[in-house]
Image: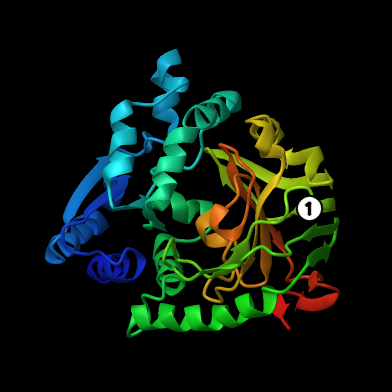
Amino acid sequence: MIDPDAFAVLIADWCLEVEPGQQILVETTTLAEELASALHGAILERDAWPLLRITPPGIGNVVNRGAEFFRHARERHLDGFAPMSLLEAQTADSRVRIDAPGSVGMTATDPALVTRHAAATAQLQLARAAIRWCGTIWPTPALADRAGMSEPAYEQFLERALFLDQPDPVAAWRALSVRQATVVEHLTPVREIRIETVGTDLTLTVSDRSWANSDGKRNMPSGEVFTSPHELSANGTIHFDVPSYRGGFQVSDVELRFVDGEVVGAHAADGDEYLQAALATDAGARFLGEIGIGTNVGIDRATGSTLLDEKIAGTVHLALGRSYPETGGRNESALHWDLICDLRKGGRLTVDGEPLIIDGELV
């Protein structure tokens, strides 16, 4: 069983580094009440203000809406957002979003409505990204079912992924940060990256872009290094063999073909309607905003949660849409969708012609 008090300490001290007087937004569902309550106490103990935003499952938050929102929303809601939510995002010091869904599907919702609302909230998304933030997860029956695991097995899996099975979780994340720093150092002078596996041969350029060490400060769990590729550099084809769950839709076996950075061909065996709608979000949705390399050995299988799956050691992920300005990226979009390619069975990633990953193992 995950200890909510230990988890709350990890979020407060490592992820957010809560300081006296700060205003901390906590967003989740009623299914994560244990963690929200523990985090409420941890924030107060650090002499800061906890601002809890706890909703029933299915409603979602002001950006990641659930099925209930789309069932009742009018034109005003689909094409905008409450001004108060923007003010809150602009004045808070940091926020944490705890994923704790009651269900994982939204099959009755038109994918075009989901992407339409995403485009309408672009300004709000930017404001929320401008403050310190952390995205994390709490085990629920729906998440365990999607992962194909029993609830106790899923909790144990998540505990390992979060390093909460370690005597000192903060020290464990600090050690991972040090290890990843060596990977960042190795990648910093790299000009070209090539990804090769079944159905995949893609090259892109990352010269003069900085690499970020994702060590749990933003995502918890984390375990990746990432950057934003040059916007017009991607050429070739890539097959994403890890299923993606986006906006309540399952999208599987995605194949993308790039010419000079732009997606010119796209198909998904499952969820193709959502894929096409996402690519039509705006002009930047057809270009890449990120390439990331997973390093977390505590996550050894796909579970249907992008937060977890993109960190699997031996995988590489690319994000369609919005890039990270802090890494030098310039692509603007309301979309940021991470898609994962598993290199552990016959794949390789080379940097300037030299192997970095072979069959999922860092060289």
Q: Nearer the viewer, residue 208 or 311?
A: 208
Rendered image quadrant of residue 191: bottom right
The residue depicted at 42 percent of the width and 36 percent of the height is 124
Estimate how packed mark 1 is, as few (under 14), some (14 to 19) or many (20 or more) residues with alpha carbons within 10 Å.
Answer: many
Residue 64 visible? The answer is: no
Residue 75, given in percent of the width and then of the height, sits at 45, 14
Q: Nearer the viewer, residue 208 or 251?
A: 208
- Amino acid identity at mark 1: His
Q: Residue at x 82, y 71 (%)?
A: 346
Q: Quadrant of the C terminus?
A: bottom right
Whether residue 262 can be seen here? yes
User: Quadrant of the image for the N terminus?
Assistant: bottom left
Judge left or right: residue 269 versus residue 147: right
Left or right: 348 as drawn, with respect to 86: right
Q: Where's residue 277, x and y in %?
A: 66, 29
With respect to residue 67, does 217 lie above or below? below
* Quadrant hosting residue 3: bottom left
Residue 168 sits in quarter: bottom left
Image spot of residue 223 (x, y percent) = 53, 70
Left or right of 342 on screen, residue 180:
left
Q: Secondary structure at mark 1?
A: strand
Task: Please determine whether, in this image, residue 306 is positioned above or below residue 15.
Answer: above
Determine which residue is flagged by label 1: 239
